[in-house]
Each structure stands twice: as structure tokens, then as C-alpha cells.
């Protein structure tokens, strides 16, 4: 129970209430002591008035008056004359004198504390003002033992009452915590466990209902998290299914492309100049397709293989990409501009960089064709202190706002209607595999520019 939230609240409440009562206890004891002494002064004054009324009181009656007042002697000052009214033998000399007429709260608390912790029976003198102005002052001598016993009994009653109040208050707080906090928290925990059993079930997502604002905020944050997680899990499932389908397709497509590759070997023997010029490009495209199929089958559906780095002329890769796009473009006047320095060697995986540039250039061409406008697609590159920067830019209409928000997320960042949104996600993953980054540099009505940053291994 002590490990529970309500149990700890219960214990802490008892402790705090007891501490508060202790802080009240000391002034209460001081006030009790003052009242006790004042009552003895009042009794002594009444006894002295009886003597003043009849001077012929015998010794036995005088002793009885002092015994009832619980004092040894009474001194009353009237009209500037100090008069010993009642007296009896004192067993001990006077230990201390306490003047209650102008005593401060601090003095009263100090004296009460000292008396409470002093078990020795002493004789003290107490001075106070007579009631109803029956003189200038009254002074008595008395024992401290009865006073201390009365103080202890009063203190025990206060402590007992404090304990009862503490337990009662703690129980009320315990019930309040159970109702307002513990039960809602247990309900949230139950919702979390139910969701964990089947996180793909959207019906198990928590529905905020707490009345406590802080707990409701926690429920709303949890609801948002579970919604995102459920969406991500469904996305992962779709990707897994897609990957399985791609693996099956890649297996059969590889066989088909292998046959096509055999046919291209014969085409290369043709004497037609156009065929001779196009045959190497066709062979290269089919070889890339076969390599991609084999890569998919070898490394699985969800991850790209590590790049095989080698020094390559970036110009050759860009030219291959442009030639492939020239064959597939429509009648629009789209210009492909290779603005790279001559050769421009880079250390990359040529097949993966070809796929990256092919995706970016194809997206740029399709954006221009979709907008039915002419324009240009330009590729530039620079080497700044071993960091290669490759830019692919176009003069198209720019990316839609929705596409820019989830640009590099699979199935979210499609830049054109009907697109799968996989191209840029694949391109970004391939560049990350090279230890670089692919970023959208700008996209507005004047066109779009992507930047590839690659660090070069020396």
C-alpha cells in the first residue's frame, strides 16, 4: 500500500498534520500554563478577601484556604502597601519569579517549555494583577509539580486530538485521491494495456475523458502518440506487403530481363548505325534493371545494400540519365543541361547515384510536362573542401505545399497526381547510405532545386 500513490498521500498527510499540530502545541501549552497560574492568583485573591473580611480567622481555616488555592502564601499590595495576607511554611526556597503582568509571547513560550522538560519539583513566585482592580498586584508562592502534571495531561489530550484529526484528514484525502487521481490513472493504464495488445486496432486508441486538466492533457498527448503509432504500423504493414510483392516481381522480371539481354547481344552485331549507337545504351539499361532485381532479392524488401564506392566520372552518369529521359519525354520543349565541369570524378556507387539522379530528373521532367510548359532541367556540381554538392534544378511550377510537408516519406511525398511518393524516399535513403544528405533547397513559382551533399573519401 505504501508503494501506491494514495498510500503515500495517506502517510504524508498524517505526517504534515502532526507537524502542524506540533507547531500549535507549544503555544497552546504556554497559554495553558498562563491560564493555570492566573487561576491560582484568582483563587489566592479570593482566599485573601475572606481573611480581609474577618481578621479573626483561625490558623486551621487559613491553612485550608491556602490548600484550596494550592499556594504557600499570598501577598496583596493595596494603596502602595505590601501586605502578607496568608502564609504557611515553604518546603524549599523560591527558585524563580514569574511576572505575568507584561510577559511577552516569547517569554511565556520559553518559560512553559522549560517547565515542561524540568521534572524537578520547585517553589516559584508568581506576580499578577488582581481581578476587578482589587489592589495594585498580587503575589503568590506555589509548587511546580502540580503545574507540570497538569501541563503534561493537557499536552497528551492535544496530541491525541491531533492524531484523530490527522487520521480523519488523511482518510478523506485518501478517498479524494482515489476518486480524482488513482481511478483515472488506472483507467489510462488499462487503456494503454488494451492498446498494447493490438496497436493496429484504431478502436483501441484512448479517448480523453479525465476531468483533471493535467491528466486530460496527458490523455490527449497519449491519444496523439497512439494515433501516430497506429498509422505508422499500418504504413509498415503496407510497406512489408509491397516489399513481398516487389521481391516476387523482381524474381520473374530478372528472368525476363536476362532473356532480353541475350537478344541485345545479337542486336549489337547489326550494321545499322542507329542500332549500333543505341545498342550499348539498351544493354546498359537492361543490366541496371537486372542488377536492381538481384539487389532486391539479395538484400530484402526493406533495406538498400551498402554502396560499393569507386571513383566514377559524374559526367557519364548524368549523360546516361539525360539520354534516358530524352527518349521518354513528350513533345514539350524541355532542355536537359549538363553544367558539370569536364569529367568531375567522384567516389560513389555509380548504380545508386544513377538511380538518385534519374529520380530527381524524371520528377523535374514530369512536373514540366504536367504543367504543359517548356523549360529546362539543369545539373550542376562543385567540390568545396572535399564536400561534393550536386544540384538538380528545374524551371517548373514548384512542388505543392502538401508534397513539401512529407517530401521524403514513402507514400506521402508524391509531387504529382498518381505518383507513389517512393522515388524521393528511395533517393534520400541512397544518399544517406553514402553518408550524405538530400535536401529541398527551394521550390516556388520559378522552379525547384534539390541539393545533394556527399563527403568524399580520400
Image: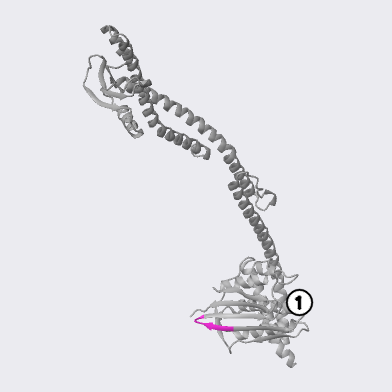
Residue at 59%, 71% (x, y): give it.
305
Q: Is residue 195 visible?
A: yes
Is 382 magenta? The answer is yes
Considering depth in this image, is 85 or 405 the residue closer to the camera?
85
- Give the image quarter of residue 397: bottom right
Percent x, y for residue 249?
71, 69
Instruction: Identify the residue under disc 1.
Output: 370
Q: Is residue 166 above or below residue 68?
A: below
- State the residue in front, 23 or 433: 23
Q: Return the x and y of residue 66 as percentages of the image width and height.
A: 30, 13
**Corner quadrant of residue 117:** top left
Residue 123, percent from left and from top: 25, 21
In the image shown, does 64 or 325 lie closer to the viewer? 64
Q: Quadrant of residue 371?
A: bottom right
Q: Is residue 369 left or right of residue 116?
A: right
The magenta region covers 381-386
How many residues crowd mark 1 within 10 Å: few (<14), some (14–19), many (20+)?
few
Amino acid at each position: 500500500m505504501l508503494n501506491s500513490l494514495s498510500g503515500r498521500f495517506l502517510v504524508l498527510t498524517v505526517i504534515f498534520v502532526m507537524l502542524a499540530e506540533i507547531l500549535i502545541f507549544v503555544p497552546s501549552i504556554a497559554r495553558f500554563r498562563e491560564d493555570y497560574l492566573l487561576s491560582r492568583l484568582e483563587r489566592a485573591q479570593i482566599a485573601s478577601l475572606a481573611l480581609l473580611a474577618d481578621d479573626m480567622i483561625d490558623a486551621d481555616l487559613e491553612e485550608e484556604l491556602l490548600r484550596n488555592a494550592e499556594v504557600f502564601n499570598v501577598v496583596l499590595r493595596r494603596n502602595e502597601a505590601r501586605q502578607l495576607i496568608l502564609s504557611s511554611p515553604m518546603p524549599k526556597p523560591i527558585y524563580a519569579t514569574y511576572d505575568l503582568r507584561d510577559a511577552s509571547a516569547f517569554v511565556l513560550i520559553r518559560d512553559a517549555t522549560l517547565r515542561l522538560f524540568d521534572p524537578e519539583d520547585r517553589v516559584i513566585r508568581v506576580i499578577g494583577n488582581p481581578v476587578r482592580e482589587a489592589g495594585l498586584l498580587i503575589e503568590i508562592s506555589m509548587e511546580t509539580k502540580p503545574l507540570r502534571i497538569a501541563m503534561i495531561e493537557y499536552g497528551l489530550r492535544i496530541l491525541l486530538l491531533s492524531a484523530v484529526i490527522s487520521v480523519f484528514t488523511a482518510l478523506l484525502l485518501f478517498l479524494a485521491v482515489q476518486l480524482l487521481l488513482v481511478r483515472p490513472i488506472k483507467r489510462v493504464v488499462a487503456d494503454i494495456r488494451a492498446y498494447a495488445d493490438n496497436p493496429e486496432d484504431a478502436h483501441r486508441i484512448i479517448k480523453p475523458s479525465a476531468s483533471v486538466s493535467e491528466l486530460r492533457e496527458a490523455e490527449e498527448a497519449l491519444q496523439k502518440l497512439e494515433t501516430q503509432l497506429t498509422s505508422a504500423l499500418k504504413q509498415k504493414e503496407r510497406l512489408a506487403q509491397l516489399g513481398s510483392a516487389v521481391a516476387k516481381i523482381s524474381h520473374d522480371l530478372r528472368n525476363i530481363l536476362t532473356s532480353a539481354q541475350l537478344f541485345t547481344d545479337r542486336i549489337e552485331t547489326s550494321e545499322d548505325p542507329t542500332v549500333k549507337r543505341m545498342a550499348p545504351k539498351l544493354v546498359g539499361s537492361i543490366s541496371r534493371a537486372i542488377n536492381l532485381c538481384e539487389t532486391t532479392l539479395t538484400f530484402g524488401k526493406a533495406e538498400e545494400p551498402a554502396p560499393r564506392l569507386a571513383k566514377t566520372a559524374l559526367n557519364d552518369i548524368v549523360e546516361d540519365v539525360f539520354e534516358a529521359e530524352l527518349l521518354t519525354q513528350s513533345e514539350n520543349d524541355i532542355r536537359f543541361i549538363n553544367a558539370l565541369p569536364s569529367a568531375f570524378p567522384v567516389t560513389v556507387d555509380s548504380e545508386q547515384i544513377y538511380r538518385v539522379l534519374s529520380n530527381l530528373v524524371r520528377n523535374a521532367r514530369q512536373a514540366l510536362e504536367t504543367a504543359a510548359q517548356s523549360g529546362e532541367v539543369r545539373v550542376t556540381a562543385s567540390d568545396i573542401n572535399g564536400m561534393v554538392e550536386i544540384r538538380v534544378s528545374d524551371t517548373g511550377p514548384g512542388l505543392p505545399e502538401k508534397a513539401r510537408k512529407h517530401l521524403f516519406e514513402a507514400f506521402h511525398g508524391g509531387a504529382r497526381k498518381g505518383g507513389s511518393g517512393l522515388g524521393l524516399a528511395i533517393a534520400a535513403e541512397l544518399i544517406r547510405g553514402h553518408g550524405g544528405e538530400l535536401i529541398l533547397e527551394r521550390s516556388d513559382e520559378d522552379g525547384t532545386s534539390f541539393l545533394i551533399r556527399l563527403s568524399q573519401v580520400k
